[in-house]
Image (cartoon, rainbow, N blue to C red):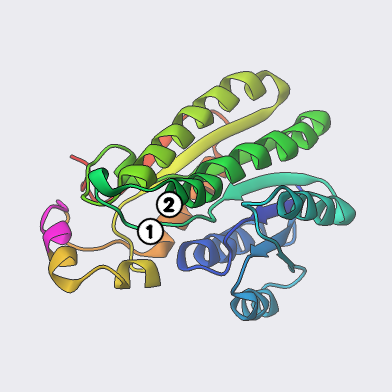
Amino acid sequence: MAQDIAVITGASGGIGAAIARKIHARSGSDLRLALHCHKNLGAARKLSSDLPESFVIQADLAQTAGRETLVQEVLKQGTPYVLINCAGLSKPYEPALDVTEAAFDVLIAANLKAPLFLMKEFGKEMARAGSGVIVNVSSILAHKTLAGSAIYRAGKAALEELTKQFAMELGPRGVRVNAVAPGLIRTPMADEIPESARARIVSQISVGEMGSPDSVAEAVCHLIENDYINGAVIPVDGGLGL
């Protein structure tokens, strides 16, 4: 891994925190970590206290001003080398015939608009430096139906296509762009799924159990470190998508 800054959005969440810890462990002192959070500032600060040389940036990435804050604060500290777009929302859940414009605006802003424009702004800086890696966190639901998830699924599917587009355009400039697509992972978000529904999903996982945030973090680090992977979407779902 090259030097300077790794930006992890949504670092206060279960998967984001695992990614931050794994990057810190794998990179040693070569990368400083910019830990983004929106509302859970306490969790982000606690994580930062465990990761020397990391720093916290609080911002609402669904808003232009929030994205500008994140970019500006990172650039004050140095040059971004890694961007992990992990922040996102899964709610509200709405059946297809009940979808609302309000839900569309909220979910698309968080899950598609924010990572798109962060890829644009940080991608410019990486291209200027001649190197960088972007990893987007998608979802197995980009390819698998689930009642109530129409807008969420559409946003994640679009994010995977943007991943490929940026990979093609930025690859010649030294910047690789990939994605991971987690399945059912043991996080507070998964805990919100009713137990009966969660059991049905687990029954469809070929390895027979939910995944850990560390398994997603390991895949992210692989995409950072392997310099010949570009434009890929790696499922981390235990076979749920089969």
Q: Quick check: 71 left or right of 10?
A: right
Q: Quadrant of the C terminus?
A: top left
Query: Which quadrant of the figure has residue 126?
Result: top right
Q: Position of residue 185 (x, y in %)?
A: 33, 62
Report which residue position mark 2 lands on: 103
Q: Which residues are magenta?
A: 200-206
Where in the figure is residue 111, as x and y percent of width and height?
50, 47
Identify the residue under disc 1.
92
**Res. 30 image quadrant:** bottom right
Label located before the other in sequence (2 or 1): 1
Q: CA distance from mark 2 to mark 1?
A: 6 Å
Q: Residue at x 84, y 51 (%)?
A: 72
Q: Of the residues shown, which amino acid type is indicated by label 1?
A: Pro
Circle 2/circle 1 CB separation < 8 Å? yes
x and y, in percent, of residue 99 in the image: 33, 47
The residue located at (69%, 80%) in the rendering is: 49
